[in-house]
Image (cartoon, helix red, strand yellow):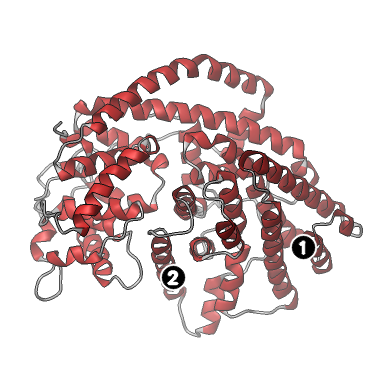
Amino acid sequence: MALPHFMSISTNIPTNIDPQTGNTRLPHTATMPTTQKWNMSQALTLNSNPSTQQNLKTEYANFTDELHIKHAKKLNEVKHSFSKVGEDPLEGLAMIDAVQRLGIDYHFHEKIDEVLQRHYTKINTHTCVDNYDDLYEVSLRFRLLRQEGYYVTAGVFNKFKGKDGMFKEKLKQDIKGLMGLYEASQLRIEQEDVLDDAANFSSHILSSWVKHLDHHHQGRNIIRSTLTNPYHKSLARFMVKNFIKDFNGINGQGNVLQELAEMDFKLVQSIHQREILQVSQWWDNLGLAKELKFARDQPLKWHMWSMAILTNSSFSEQRSELTKPISLIYIIDDIFDVHGTLDELTLFTEAVNRWDIAALEHLPDCMKISFKALYDTTNEIGYKIYKKHGRNPTESLRKAWATLCNAFLVEAKWFASGHSPKAEEYLKNGVVSSGVHVVLVHVFFLLGHGLTNESANLVNDIPELMHSVATILRLWDDLGSAKDENQEGHDGSYVEYYMKEHQGCSVELAQQHVHNMISDAWKRLNKECLHPNTFPASFKIATLNVARMVPLMYSYDNNHHLTDLEEQVKQMLYGSVSL
């Protein structure tokens, strides 16, 4: 079966354009329409209304049965097409790239692995010689294999360098290849100089194209989107709307994939709407919002974490459960950050370490209520996991919460004493106080994949897989733009402490240093996701998704609002993708 060109957006990018004139047309990139002001609080209020809840339940029951039937039929069509992928090496790679970008790859894990295993075998046996000089194909193969955990040497890109060690001049005209090279460079690990060079070279040339092309040029947005949202560091589900419009505009023959993506989006959307009802009801019943007026009240925002981390439509129950500890992380953070005295916080931390409600006797009501919610919620989640997977994780969950509160207390003591820690001392503790470890321990046990004594013990110790993600979150949080619209606390900042240690260092230089540290953390994370690894693929994907969500969750505008996140919530819960 010959694969039509629409199977990959990049294959339709012309390889030769004059940067001075920009005459050659590129495929159209549709942008999000301008909409009226909308925010997550309004959405939560709407979903909390009893009549709205009943209407959503009725609509869900009425349309999902029919949609499920149509979806199943279309899914079989695509699987049939996938099974007939021909001998052309690029054909299978382009198909994988398409289903991943359309957010429907979770339906095709076995077929994707079969195709990539075939490519990996050819590389290892030195029989992969097809289009070895084609930068785009080499880049695409490299990226897809590394994304699935296969180690491919970065040396495959040395062929595209000249004798001077620089990437060849002729590549500057290969827009498709440069985009593929930039995407591939996002999978680099430490000490891969050729991929560092590839990232710098491709980003510089592609940025030059963006500057030279007319603002109304059809291809300008595609190049810019690649630079700002490379696939490996983006959440495909959040990018589907833009991609599917490009996909449709490239070639109308791709209807079968487009239709499946649209149906899948609607099904997942209906599941998310139902989850929001469940989370809203749980949060209202918990009663913390009424009792703790000083704390944040953002269950929809917190559930966005779960939606981003666990993208498979079959993980609905896990998403709803995951939102519970995420919510409690924010609440306990507010207790430490804006409310409790040091003596109270010390007693609260001791109670969490002892896991003893009786230890709360001399604490204020807000702490008693919060610990009771933490205690009950953790035990309930532990029991559900035990019933489903046969392993009781409560001890691991309890230890994770104790570790988090210990880190919160360290920061509270610093503030109370006026102590200014060294930047690295702050970061070491900040990795723990980020809450990432608590989230990922819950993810690990909720998924229930690869539950062995070795892996269960490993998650308790914050392994590098978790540590690198926590570093990314902590440093992003400290870049200066993360000022929560509903939080007035006394947080420290790596940038602040770094500048105190390096007298004369400007804010800009300190922030660049942090960006470099984030880049290094991504390299370590990429390495941890390669085979062999103790953790199952589903958990590694979830871990990557935490890192991918961080920029969206911590990029506040000048009004301290998460405008981009709010737009994504609106799209995922109430928007549509159309052919």
Badge 2 density bin: few <14, some 14–19, many ≥20, Cα 10 Å = some
> Is 494 located above or below residue 144 in the figure?
below
Q: Secondary structure at mark 1?
A: helix
Residue linked to disc 1: 353
Lateral position of residue 392 relative to residue 75, left or right? right
Residue at image location 44% in from the left, 34% down from the top: 35
Front in this rendered view, residue 70 or 483: 70
Front in this rendered view, residue 20 or 139: 139
Lateral position of residue 241 relative to residue 550, left or right? left
Asked if one can make out residue 447 in the rendered structure from this viewpoint, the answer is yes
> Is 533 located above or below residue 213 in the figure?
below
Front in this rendered view, residue 331 or 2: 2
Residue linked to disc 2: 517
Q: Amino acid at mark 1?
A: Asn
Lateral position of residue 443 relative to residue 127, left or right? right
Q: Amino acid at mark 2?
A: Met
* Mark number displayed over residue 549: none
Total number of numbered labels? 2
Task: Say which quadrant the N terminus sits in.
Answer: top left
